[in-house]
Image (cartoon, helix red, strand yellow):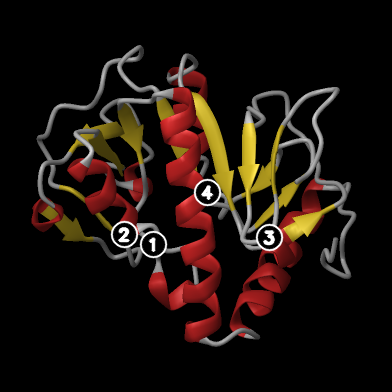
């Protein structure tokens, strides 16, 4: 397995530097390469959704300029199979008011509006999903460990939402070059149940094996 050269980060103050390095890793790959990687990830995510018979699935709109895993084609595939697709909603990070945040059921991606952060999300005023409503949440990452811990952008959105939607299966998606050996783990962190990359996937647990 090929991880990052900076594969062990144990101190919280190292996270900012690690985010910069992780973003640099993405930029070393062409858009075509990242789309090929994303296609492999989409296929495995779809297979997992079918395996666990998840009906209500939360995806995310990629920040294309940052090279995030692109799941957009997956939404149409899920809807063709009669699945319900949800997207993250954040009211306003600058206001630090998170009561209205959550995941919103979307019938058509045209309902999503571009944000100043570079991704699309449901329009303000939509009803967010109840805490027991979601079956599976797909989560982006800048880096991920074999134990299912992730490095995000630092806004804390998924930390808050994963503690809220505790009944949902948590699935991190990342490129294989984003796998690292260790990350600092906070008390509020929620590890994923599954990790999927373009070259491997595994369930997280004491007897989990990487395929």
Spatial CA distance of label 3 from label 4 is 10 Å
Mark 2 surroundings within 10 Å by alpha-carbon count, few (fewer than 14), some (14 through 19), many (20 or more) = some
Question: What is the CA distance from the residue labelled 4 to the residue labelled 2?
Answer: 14 Å
Measure the alpha-carbon separation of dots 1 and 3.
20 Å
Q: Report the front residue among 18 and 173.
A: 173
In the image, what residue occupies the spot 72% across and 72% down?
21
Q: 42 left or right of 80?
A: right
Left or right for 166, reference 119: right
Snapshot quadrant of residue 64: bottom left
Residue visible at 27% across and 50% down? 77
Whether residue 188 can be seen here: yes
Q: Kindly report which numbered mark, 1 or 3, lies closer to the viewer in this rendering.
A: 3
Say above or below: 159 vs 75.
Answer: above
| Mark toward the start of the polypeptide (1 vs 3) | 1
Q: Where is the N terminus found, in terms of image quarters? A: bottom right
Residue bearing mark 2: 72
Q: Which residue is mark 1?
A: 62
Q: Which residue is mark 3?
A: 199
Q: Residue at the spot x=63%, y=55% of the render?
A: 197
Q: Are marks 3 and 2 in contact (CB under 8 Å)?
A: no
Kindly report which numbered mark, 3 or 2, lies closer to the viewer in this rendering: 3
Q: How much space separates mark 1 and mark 4, taking CA atoms?
A: 17 Å
Give the mark nearer the N terminus: 3 vs 4: 4
User: How packed is label 1: few (under 14 Cα within 10 Å), some, or many (20 or more)?
Assistant: some
């Amino acid at each position: 397995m090929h991880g990052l050269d900076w594969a062990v980060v144990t101190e919280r103050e190292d996270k900012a530097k690690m985010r910069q390095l992780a973003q640099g890793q993405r930029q070393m790959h062409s858009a075509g390469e990242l789309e090929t990687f994303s296609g492999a990830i989409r296929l495995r995510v779809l297979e997992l959704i079918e395996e666990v018979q998840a009906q209500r699935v939360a995806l995310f709109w990629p920040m294309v300029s940052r090279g995030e895993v692109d799941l957009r084609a997956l939404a149409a595939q899920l809807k063709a199979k009669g699945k319900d697709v949800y997207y993250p909603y954040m009211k306003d990070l600058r206001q630090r008011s998170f009561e209205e945040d959550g995941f919103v059921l979307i019938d058509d991606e045209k309902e999503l509006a571009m944000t100043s952060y570079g991704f699309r999300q449901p329009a303000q005023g939509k009803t967010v999903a109840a805490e027991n409503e979601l079956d599976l949440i797909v989560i982006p990452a800048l880096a991920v460990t074999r134990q299912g811990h992730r490095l995000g952008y630092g806004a804390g959105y998924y930390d808050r939402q994963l503690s809220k939607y505790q009944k949902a299966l948590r699935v991190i998606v990342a490129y294989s070059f984003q796998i690292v050996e260790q990350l600092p783990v906070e008390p509020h962190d929620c590890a994923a149940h599954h990790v999927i990359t373009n070259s491997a996937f595994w369930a997280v647990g004491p007897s989990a094996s990487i395929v």
